[in-house]
Structures are given as structure tokens and as C-alpha cells.
Image: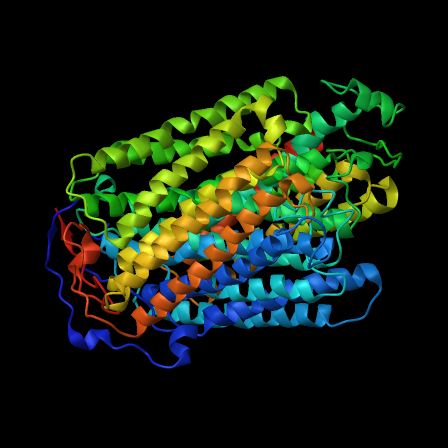
């Protein structure tokens, strides 16, 4: 991508860090903020994971076993919200904070104080959201998609807390995205032209655009839910001339770009890792950029494929079906390019590469089930079944989460200055890989056989398949404790990492020592 | 791109971001509990926490901008940083456009799709027959399917006057900016002051219009989807005008203190962009909500 003339200098006296708790509370440093995002995301991953364990425990056998149905609904709802807004999105923002300035040769993020503000909103937002679970009447129980009238007519008072928590999460995301986009546009080192940027930077540029475009629409949706529930408006009430289906249109206009927000940065990560361990340049760099942009544009035109069963006119169903299928083209370009990058490469299977390979294969499975769901006539059968659950967990867990794992294993030496325990990391990989498939693959069959999602009980013929799923779920949950242990161990010490621990790696981040100095590129490097 | 020699200013640690996060947290918790308490007749801490949150945000804004202004005045800000601020503000305004877009989208959907469908349009013949057979689709929706009646808000009179006022204020704001760039401080002060006065008149008339709607037309927030879109669109716009007027007042005070140079005046420029943005939103509102 870029050859680097190393002319920056890091004087030792520049590298003093403030100490104590105030370092973290008041920081303006992109690396500190990135670390806080990543830790926050890991904590939320376990909080949301614990809720998933409750769900899988309840579904281990047919009949009501452990929890009340309403509490089950709260678990599915808050699991989704925590994983999306608390785990996946902050993980990507954390990676962007750490890596984007280093990859483009910038001294820091463009707006460092606002950067810290964006982060610190999140703990407050999630304390509010999670505290609503302990309210009288319980927490939000309408699914993370909060469809009206479940969230308006039939919801409890936790809805108000949910609405305002989502509002400030949205403020956080928008400010974070503005920071990333301005950093990329305005802070690139001389010579770092757009078409020389690493793909992680490119994908984040496009992701940030999507975030700024759709998070305000989510804010609008929750506002209308609030006024419908508390102030007597009828946006989603047919008696007043509104329409519950309108909620779904507004929500999915946000929601569909949102799913690309949660996968585009993954594409960037995988596009960094596969060339490194194949010791080849990325195949088709510019087509990767155009494919990412096409996916982003198309993401605004496909939202109603989530709503095929709402009784839209046939014209609309066809339009959204064809647009959705079109997305398979740029996505196919990406998968093709990754495979072509590996073709005749000198491949080695270090842990980041293992996760990247698992990503390519398993994300593609999720993509294929997505194409199946895109077909209107068959979607009538799959809609709201476990097939959908299987689909989006393949793209989000073995897609987004696996890419975050891959990124962590790829850049941990750069962040901490230590090599991690590779034996433990391999154990984590294989345990995760096997258990995640035991967990999610059988869900396809349960769904095709007609098992509905978001139900605490089910017909006895689904018992075996749910037991297998639950065992996979517990195993996957426990496997992640290995990751936690590994990260803590790596942060505390270990074998010293060199500036460039992967011999095939390219990019500015590998030109600085490991751990990366507190301030990098105060004088911009020259990129040729 | 960093062509110039000046280094990019990375501010030292600052207390304000986390104070801002605390403020937003208090506002979110307080607003939620205020809403719950107001609608369920219970007593609690909601509104106290909400106001505490606003107080914290006010302190944060004061402190943050004080630091910011001191940095600018002491010349720490490079041109590249100025560009960052300008781009940041532009993207912020873009996010605001999308926020209003959600409500305009709701208005479009309700008017063009939901209401006709309730009367049996498209593939919904039986919806019309079964749900509310007597319902007749019309816009403005002066009688909802459920039977709530109201009167439509006309576009002449106050709304038209307000449109003229806001467009004029955009023009005066522009001439204030021209005055700043040509270093004509009197023109700057006069035009900026005029803009603020026009903004305030707009807000006062908007309030009068709400009273007229509530008391004479029976058009309330509860009058079905016509009243809902009317009040949420004009209401959020009014909140933005209020914020814009506050920003203009702060710019006015800074101008009186002799801040800003013809070359460097990001804060003024951002405020002016924001003001033009609320003006454009109003023109869309006037055409789509009132006239059409």
C-alpha cells in the first residue's frame, strides 16, 4: 500500500504519561481512549453474554424452566442492545481510535477532547439502560428492535429510560463518527492520498459516514416512541392516522445501515490481516474500496427486506428484494479478493490469520443465508424464525466479533508491547470455532422447521436441537473467559514484542516501537 | 493535509469531557424519570436530576468554551485545526439534517401512505372496509379514523410573517459575516444584533401561533398524526432556533469584547452556518407542513 520513509523521531521526554485515575478520566490521548473503548466493549461483551446464557439455559428444555416469560423477553431485548451498542460498536470505535491516527500518520484524533466525551457518555448510558432491569415492572421487553405497539401501547415505564439511554448512546456514536471522519479527511500525513490509505481506514471512513447519517434517524424513532407512549401522539397508531408499520420503516432505515456499520470495519481488519500472513499485497485494493462504498450506498435502499411480511405492495417487495440481492455482488467481490490474496501466497497460520480465515468462511455462510432471506417468497417462511437468528449471529458473532478478536490478536503486541501466550490463543480460537458452530449452525434447522424466535418455550420436537445449541452456547461463553485471561496476561507482561512482530505486515503502525509511544507522529511521517 | 509547518495542537488533559458525560447522564436519567413521574402522578427526583443535569452541562459549556477561546486567542490553533473544526461542524449539521429527515419522512409516510391506506387505497380495500368504514382520507387530517376532530393551520398570517422574518434574519446574519470579513465592526455588530432580535421575534410569534392552535383551532399534540407531525417538526425547529439565538447572543458578546479577526472566526462562522441551517429547515417546513 505505501512505502514509508522513516523520518519521525520520538524523543523520550515526549513520552511521559499522566498517572493515576485522572489519566483515564481527563485524557485526550487517542490510545488511552481507544483502550477504554476496548475494555468497555469487553465488559459489555460479558454482560450481554451472561444474558445470552440465561436465554440458552431457559431454552435447554421445552417448558418454562428458570425464568418468567417476561424476564426472558427482557433478556433477549437487553442482550441485543448491549451487544450492538455496548460491545460491537464500541469495539470498532476503540480500534479506530487506536489505529486510524497511527495508520495515517496523524498526531492524534482531530478533536481529542470531544473524543473523550464520546467515550465517557457510554458508561452512563449503559448504567441507565441496565438499571432499568431492576425497576418495578422490569426492563425493556419488546426486543432490541422495539417495534410499536410493543414499545408504545404494551410497554412498561422502563421505556422512558430506554429511550433516553439510546439518545445519549446516539450522541456518543455521532460525535465519535464525526471525529473519525474529520481525522481521516484532514489529518493524513503528506503523501497519504486516499487511495494509499489502509483499508481499515477506508472502511471506517465509510462507516463513519453511515453513522452520522443514520444515528439521528434512530433518535427520531425513539422520540416518536416516547411521545406515542407518554404524550398521546399517534405516529404508530392507526386510530390517529398513523401506522405501526411506519415505525418499522423508520427503524429499519436506521437499522439496515446499522448492520453495515457493524461489519464494514471488519472488512477493513480482514483486509489488513490476510495480506500480512499470505505475504502478498491485497488483491484488488481499489475494487475493495469501491465495493465498500457500493455496499454503503445500497444499504440505504434495502431496509424494507426486514418487513416482507407486513403486507407491502408487491412493487415494494420486488424493489427491496432485488436491491438486497444486489448487495451480494460487492460482498462477493470482497470475498473473492480475500481468497485471491491468499492464492499462491506463503501462508502461515498465526492466531490473527486463523480468526481471519474463520471470518471469511463463516461470514460467507451468514451472507448466503442473507441471500436466502432476501427472497421475498421464501422469507415468508423464514421470517421471525430461528433461521433469522442463525443468520445474523453468523454475521455478527463469527463476522464482527471474530474480526475484533482477529484485530486484537493482530495488534495486541503493538498495544501492550508484549507477545501474548500463543498456545492459549490457539486454544481460544479452536474452542470458539467449534463451539460457535455447535451453537449457531443447528439454529438454521430449528428455524426452517418453524421454531419462532423470542419465545421462552417451544414444541417438543425442537428439544434435541435446542439442547445441542445450548451446549454450544455454554461452551462458547466459557471459551471467551480464555480471551479475557489472555488479554489480562498480555497487558501485564510477557515476551517483549518487536516493532513489527509479523514479518509480512505493512503500514505506518509497524514503523513505531511496541508498545506504541504515548504520542506518535507529532511530526508527520512522509509517505511515498 | 498537513502542508504547513505549524504543528497540530493536541490539547492537554481536560476535565470538561467527563463533566459533559456526567451532565448528559443526569439529563437522560432525569428526563426519563420526569416523563414517568409526570404521566403517572408519582413523586420523585426526576425533574431535580434533570435540572441538575442542565446545570452541569451549562458549567461544562462555560468551562470548555473558556479554555477553547483562550487557546484561540493565544494563537495555538493552526489552520489545519481550524479545518478540523469546520469539517466537524459541517458533519454535525448533516446529522441534524438527518434528524429532521426522520420527522419529514414520518410526515410523508403518514400523508401519502398510511392515511390513504386506512381509507382502502392500494392493496388495502378490506382495511378500509373493516377498520373504520366511515373514515375518509384527507390532508390535513382534520378527522382521524378514531374520530378526533381538529382544524387545519393555514399558511398565511403568522406562518408567512415568520417565514419572512427568518429569511430576513438569514440575510442580516450573512451581512454580519461580510462585515466581519471586511473588518467593518459597526456593520457586524448592528447586523448581528438585528439577527438576534429577528430570532427572538420569530420565537415569540411561534409561541403565539401555538396558543392560537391550542385555544382556537383545537389543534393539539393529541390531534392525530397531523397534529403530531406539526408539533414535533415545528417544535424541534423552534428548539433549534432557540439554541441558534443563544449561540448568536454569545457571538454578539464576543464581538463586543473585540474577539474575531477577518481571517479567523471559526465560532462565528459555525454559528452563522447553524443559523442558515435552521432557516433552510424552516423553508422546508413552511412549504411541506403549512402550504402543501
Q: Residue at x 35, y 66 (%)?
A: A487
Q: Residue at x 53, y 62 (%)?
A: A47
Q: Position of residue A501 (x, y in %)?
A: 18, 59
Q: Position of residue A178 (x, y in %)?
A: 42, 51
Residue nearest the observer in this picture, B72 or A195: A195
Q: Is residue A282 left or right of residue A472?
A: left
Toward which corner of the image does residue A335 lie, by quadrant?
top left
Where A469 falls versus A490 (above or below)?
A: above
Residue nearest the observer in this picture, A198 or A491: A491
Toward which corner of the image does residue A251 lie, by quadrant?
top right
- Looking at the rendered image, the quarter that the N terminus of chain A falls into is top left
Where A376 falls versus B6 (above or below)?
A: above
Where B111 falls versus A191 (above or below)?
A: above
Residue found at the very far bottom of the displayed protein: A20
Q: Position of residue B231 (x, y in %)?
A: 72, 44
Q: Position of residue B201 (x, y in %)?
A: 67, 51
Q: Residue at x 41, y 44 (%)?
A: A207
Amino acid at each position: 500500500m505505501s512505502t514509508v520513509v522513516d523520518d519521525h523521531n520520538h524523543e523520550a521526554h515526549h513520552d511521559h504519561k499522566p498517572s493515576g485515575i485522572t489519566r483515564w478520566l481527563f485524557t485526550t490521548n487517542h490510545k488511552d481512549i481507544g483502550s477504554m473503548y476496548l475494555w468497555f466493549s469487553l465488559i459489555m461483551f460479558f454482560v450481554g453474554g451472561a444474558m445470552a446464557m440465561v436465554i440458552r439455559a431457559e431454552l435447554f428444555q421445552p417448558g418454562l424452566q428458570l425464568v418468567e416469560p417476561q424476564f426472558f423477553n427482557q433478556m433477549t431485548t437487553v442482550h441485543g442492545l448491549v451487544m450492538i451498542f455496548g460491545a460491537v460498536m464500541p469495539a470498532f470505535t476503540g480500534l479506530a481510535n487506536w489505529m486510524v491516527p497511527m495508520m495515517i500518520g496523524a498526531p492524534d484524533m482531530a478533536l481529542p477532547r470531544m473524543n473523550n466525551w464520546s467515550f465517557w457518555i457510554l458508561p452512563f448510558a449503559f448504567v441507565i439502560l441496565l438499571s432499568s432491569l431492576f425497576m418495578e415492572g422490569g426492563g425493556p421487553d419488546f426486543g432490541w428492535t422495539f417495534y410499536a405497539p410493543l414499545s408504545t401501547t404494551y410497554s412498561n415505564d422502563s421505556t422512558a429510560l430506554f429511550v433516553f439511554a439510546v439518545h445519549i448512546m446516539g450522541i456518543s456514536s455521532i460525535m465519535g463518527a464525526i471525529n473519525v471522519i474529520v481525522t481521516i479527511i484532514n489529518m493524513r500525513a503528506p503523501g497519504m492520498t486516499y487511495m494509499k490509505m489502509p483499508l481499515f481506514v477506508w472502511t471506517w471512513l465509510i462507516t463513519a459516514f453511515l453513522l452520522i447519517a443514520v444515528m439521528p434517524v434512530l433518535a427520531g424513532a425513539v422520540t416518536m416512541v416516547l411521545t406515542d407512549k407518554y404524550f398521546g401522539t399517534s405516529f404508530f397508531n392507526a386510530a390517529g392516522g398513523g401506522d405501526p408499520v411506519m415505525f418499522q420503516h423508520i427503524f429499519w432505515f436506521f437499522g439496515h445501515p446499522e448492520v453495515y456499520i457493524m461489519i464494514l470495519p471488519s472488512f477493513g481488519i480482514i483486509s489488513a490481516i490476510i495480506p500480512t500472513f499470505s505475504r502478498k499485497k491485497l488483491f484488488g485494493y481499489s475494487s475493495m474500496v469501491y465495493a465498500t462504498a457500493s455496499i454503503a450506498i445500497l444499504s440505504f435502499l434495502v431496509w424494507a427486506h426486514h418487513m416482507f411480511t407486513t403486507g407491502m405492495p408487491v412493487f415494494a417487495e420486488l424493489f427491496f428484494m432485488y436491491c438486497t440481492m444486489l448487495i451480494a455482488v460487492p460482498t462477493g467481490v470482497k470475498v473473492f479478493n480475500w481468497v485471491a490474496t491468499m492464492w499462491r501466497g506463503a501462508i502461515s497460520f498465526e492466531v490473527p490469520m486463523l480468526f481471519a480465515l474463520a471470518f471469511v468462511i463463516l461470514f460467507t455462510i451468514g451472507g448466503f443465508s442473507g441471500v436466502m432471506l432476501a427472497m421475498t417468497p421464501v422469507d415468508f417462511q423464514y421470517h421471525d424464525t430461528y433461521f433469522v437468528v442463525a443468520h445474523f449471529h453468523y454475521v455478527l458473532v463469527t463476522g464482527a466479533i471474530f474480526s475484533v478478536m482477529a484485530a486484537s490478536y493482530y495488534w495486541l503486541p503493538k498495544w501492550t508491547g508484549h507477545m501474548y501466550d500463543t498456545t492459549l490463543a490457539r486454544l481460544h480460537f479452536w474452542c470458539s470455532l467449534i463451539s460457535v458452530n455447535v451453537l449457531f449452525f443447528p439454529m438454521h434447522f430449528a428455524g426452517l422447521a418453524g421454531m419462532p424466535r423470542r419465545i421462552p418455550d417451544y414444541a417438543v420436537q425442537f428439544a434435541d436441537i435446542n439442547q445441542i445449541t445450548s451446549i454450544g452456547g455454554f461452551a462458547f461463553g466459557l471459551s471467551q473467559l480464555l480471551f479475557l485471561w489472555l488479554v489480562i496476561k498480555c497487558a501485564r507482561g510477557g515476551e517483549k514484542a518487536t516493532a513489527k512482530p509479523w514479518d509480512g505486515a505493512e503500514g505506518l503502525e509497524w514503523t513505531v516501537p511496541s508498545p506504541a509511544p504515548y504520542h506518535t507522529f507529532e511530526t508527520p511521517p512522509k509517505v511515498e | 493535509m498537513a502542508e504547513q509547518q505549524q504543528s497540530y495542537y493536541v490539547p492537554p488533559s481536560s476535565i470538561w469531557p467527563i463533566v459533559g458525560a456526567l451532565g448528559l447522564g443526569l439529563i437522560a436519567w432525569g428526563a426519563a424519570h420526569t416523563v414517568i413521574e409526570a404521566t403517572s402522578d408519582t413523586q420523585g427526583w426526576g425533574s431535580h436530576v434533570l435540572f441538575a443535569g442542565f446545570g452541569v452541562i451549562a458549567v461544562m459549556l462555560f468551562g470548555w468554551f473558556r479554555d477553547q477561546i483562550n487557546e484561540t486567542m493565544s494563537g495555538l490553533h493552526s489552520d489545519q485545526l481550524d479545518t478540523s473544526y469546520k469539517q466537524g461542524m459541517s458533519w454535525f449539521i448533516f446529522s441534524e439534517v438527518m434528524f429532521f429527515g426522520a420527522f419529514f419522512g414520518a410526515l410523508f409516510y403518514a400523508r401519502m401512505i398510511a392515511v390513504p391506506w386506512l381509507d382502502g387505497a392500494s392493496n388495502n380495500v378490506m382495511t378500509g372496509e373493516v377498520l373504520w368504514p366511515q373514515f375518509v382520507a384527507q390532508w390535513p387530517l382534520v378527522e382521524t379514523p378514531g374520530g378526533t376532530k381538529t382544524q387545519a393551520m393555514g399558511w398565511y398570517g403568522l406562518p408567512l410573517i415568520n417565514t419572512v422574518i427568518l429569511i430576513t434574519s438569514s440575510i442580516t446574519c450573512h451581512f454580519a459575516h461580510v462585515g466581519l470579513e471586511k473588518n467593518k465592526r459597526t456593520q457586524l455588530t448592528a447586523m448581528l444584533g438585528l439577527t438576534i432580535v429577528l430570532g427572538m421575534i420569530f420565537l415569540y410569534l411561534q409561541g403565539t401561533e401555538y396558543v392560537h392552535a391550542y385555544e382556537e383551532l383545537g389543534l393539539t399534540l393529541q390531534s392525530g398524526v397531523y397534529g403530531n407531525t406539526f408539533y414535533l417538526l415545528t417544535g424541534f425547529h423552534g428548539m433549534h432556533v432557540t439554541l441558534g439565538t443563544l449561540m448568536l447572543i454569545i457571538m454578539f458578546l464576543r464581538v463586543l469584547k473585540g474577539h474575531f479577526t477577518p481571517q479567523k472566526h471559526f465560532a462565528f462562522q459555525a454559528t452563522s452556518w447553524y443559523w442558515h441551517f435552521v432557516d433552510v429547515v424552516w423553508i422546508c417546513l413552511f412549504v411541506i407542513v403549512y402550504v402543501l
